[in-house]
Image (cartoon, rainbow, N blue to C red):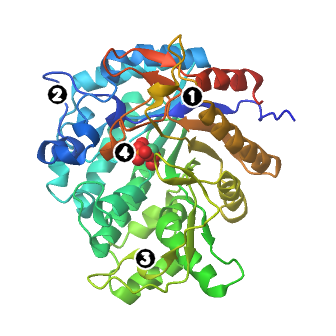
């Protein structure tokens, strides 16, 4: 059966500044938490590869964009690095950074690729982190100022803005599970960090609406549909409701509805760890919800009622549910993530039914595979038929959701090119376009050529 997507569907892929740009000798970029962490703990990063080089987009962006044009992308998301544009997080703007982003966005537009631009992708400037980062209320103000500077500088070129990518990740990874700097474990700090991020996003949206910019502004959330082990069991159901409140609705509700989930607020009250707030905050959050939602979908979350003993040292989200390891799951062994295609459909239907059918798009979906060089054919192209299968299987469900009324406007893969993945560095490759790290040569993979046909047909 052939499936067709709506006219004007956004086809493309995503990336982020910190995972692609790299550094130039003597550039003016300020230190981000990633640059800092690599200096103090390089052993944490896969094969000791840090954020300094990544895929050298600063000097190779034309080649990347040439490949994206060849594939036929009509849109591409990346992020501005706060610590590149404003090296100290607030104050002086670096003119070299301004020139670079202008060139980058101009080149996209010249190639018929619309820039979708995100403002924060896990990359806190170190000067602000030293003052507490997202724990510090002042960071919210600094983020609003940074956002305004971006709108003023690039608003004539960028018509789709995003305040943050996956704001739950700095909360989880920085303050609960120790995969991001500052790698502490403290639920009450995690709550304050999350609250400030949600407020900062609303503040940036307010600045956007006050600016002369046209276009739309949204947020990118990683929505992990939460399934109870036994859907008929009320205790399992309740475990799923609470896990969903912690990891999805904590940002989805304020971003789309301007409110926080009552289940989460009740838990925080019970633990006595409500975040510190100011009187006008809830009005800012209520009045500045998103125009558009980016949905990153990789994997579901499966839970069951809490039976295992609680963590004794301190409260954790897992005090309210146990994870459930579904024996029939399909898994991507390189990343350890379950592959469950129907989750993308369930997510879109949830947005249709419970979030006013907000305009949205799939802003990331993809499959990281280790050692992809082994799939290179004689002409040097990576034959990644597993990725083609992965995208096809997810796109079928996206299409079904659209047929059933979901307001989904596009599909972006993670990622356009292979790129640097935080602590995993270059372990797993995600791109439609491979990069030889020695030569920096870019080569479109088989999946990229397949995607080209999909774009040409607007379906498959
Ligand atoms: C998303 C992020 O969560 O997943 C990306 O927005 C990230 O920054 C991607 O790279 C894949 O995850 P990972 O950890 O394998 O790089």
Mark toward the start of the polypeptide (2 vs 3): 2
Residue under label 4, please give it: 120
Residue holding disc 3: 318
Q: Indicate left or right for 433 with 341 as reference.
A: left
Which residue is depicted at the point 38% across and 41% down? Answer: 119
Query: Label 4, label 2: how many angstroms apart (C-alpha)?
Result: 19 Å
Residue 75's disc number? 1
Tag in front: 2 or 3: 3
Q: Residues within 10 Å of mark 4 (few under 14, many from 20)?
A: many
Tell me the quarter of the image containing the N terminus.
top right
The answer to which of 199 and 232 lies nearer the viewer is: 232
Q: Which quarter of the figure is the C terminus placed in?
A: top right
Residue 213 location, x and y as percent? 48, 35
Q: Secondary structure at mark 4?
A: loop
Q: Secondary structure at mark 1?
A: strand
Residue at point 42%, 82% (across, down): 319
Earlier in the chain: of badge 4 and badge 3, it is 4
Residue at horizontal 35 percent and vertical 41 percent from the top: 148
Check the image and report above or below for 251 versus 161. Answer: below
**Which label sits in the foreground, 4 or 3?**
3
Q: Where ligand 1 lies, by quadrant?
A: top left
Q: From this viewpoint, is residue 74 visible?
A: no
- The label nearer to you, 3 versus 1, is 3
Q: Nearer the viewer, residue 46 or 460?
A: 46
What whole-number distance in Å separates the C-alpha atoms at marks 2 and 3? 42 Å
Inter-mark Cα distance, 4 to 3: 27 Å
């Amino acid at each position: 059966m052939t499936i067709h997507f709506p006219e004007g569907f956004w086809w493309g892929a995503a990336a982020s500044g910190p995972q692609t740009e790299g550094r130039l000798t003597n550039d003016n970029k300020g230190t981000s938490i990633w640059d800092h962490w690599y200096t103090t703990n390089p052993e944490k990063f896969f094969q000791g590869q840090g954020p300094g080089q990544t895929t050298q987009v600063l000097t190779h962006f034309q080649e990347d964009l040439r490949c994206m044009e060849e594939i036929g992308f009509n849109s591409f998301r990346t992020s501005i690095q706060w610590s590149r544009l404003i090296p100290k997080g607030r104050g002086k703007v670096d003119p070299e950074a301004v020139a670079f982003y202008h060139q980058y966005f101009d080149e996209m537009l010249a190639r018929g690729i619309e820039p979708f631009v995100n403002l924060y992708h896990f990359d806190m400037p170190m000067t602000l982190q030293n003052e507490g980062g997202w724990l510090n209320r002042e960071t919210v103000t600094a983020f609003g100022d940074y956002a305004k500077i971006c709108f003023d500088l690039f608003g004539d070129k960028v018509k789709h803005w995003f305040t943050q990518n996956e704001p739950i990740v700095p909360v989880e990874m920085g303050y609960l599970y120790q995969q991001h700097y500052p790698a502490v474990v403290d639920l009450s700090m995690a709550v304050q960090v999350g609250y400030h991020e949600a407020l900062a996003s609303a503040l940036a949206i307010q600045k956007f609406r006050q600016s002369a910019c046209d276009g739309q502004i949204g947020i990118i959330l990683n929505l992990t549909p939460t399934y109870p082990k036994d859907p008929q069991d009320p205790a399992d159901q309740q475990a799923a409701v609470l896990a969903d409140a912690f990891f999805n609705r904590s940002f989805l509700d304020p971003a789309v509805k301007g409110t926080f989930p009552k289940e989460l607020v009740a838990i925080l009250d019970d633990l006595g760890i409500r975040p510190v707030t100011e009187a006008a905050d809830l009005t800012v959050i209520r009045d500045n919800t998103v125009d558009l939602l980016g949905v990153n979908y990789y994997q579901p979350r499966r839970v069951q009622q809490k039976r295992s003993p609680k963590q004794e040292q301190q409260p954790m989200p897992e005090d309210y549910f146990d994870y459930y390891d579904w024996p029939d799951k399909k898994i991507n062994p390189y990343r350890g993530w379950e592959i469950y295609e129907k989750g993308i459909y369930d997510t879109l239907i949830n947005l249709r039914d419970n979030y006013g059918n907000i305009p949205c798009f799939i802003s990331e979906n993809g499959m990281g595979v280790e050692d992809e060089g082994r799939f290179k054919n004689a002409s040097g192209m990576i034959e990644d038929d597993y990725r083609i299968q992965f995208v096809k299987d997810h796109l079928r469900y996206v299409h079904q959701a659209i047929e059933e009324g979901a307001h989904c406007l596009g599909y972006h893969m993670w990622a356009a090119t292979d790129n640097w993945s935080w602590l995993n560095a270059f372990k797993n490759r995600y791109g439609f376009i491979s990069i030889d790290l020695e030569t920096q040569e870019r080569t479109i993979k088989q999946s990229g050529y397949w995607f080209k046909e999909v774009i040409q047909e607007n379906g498959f």
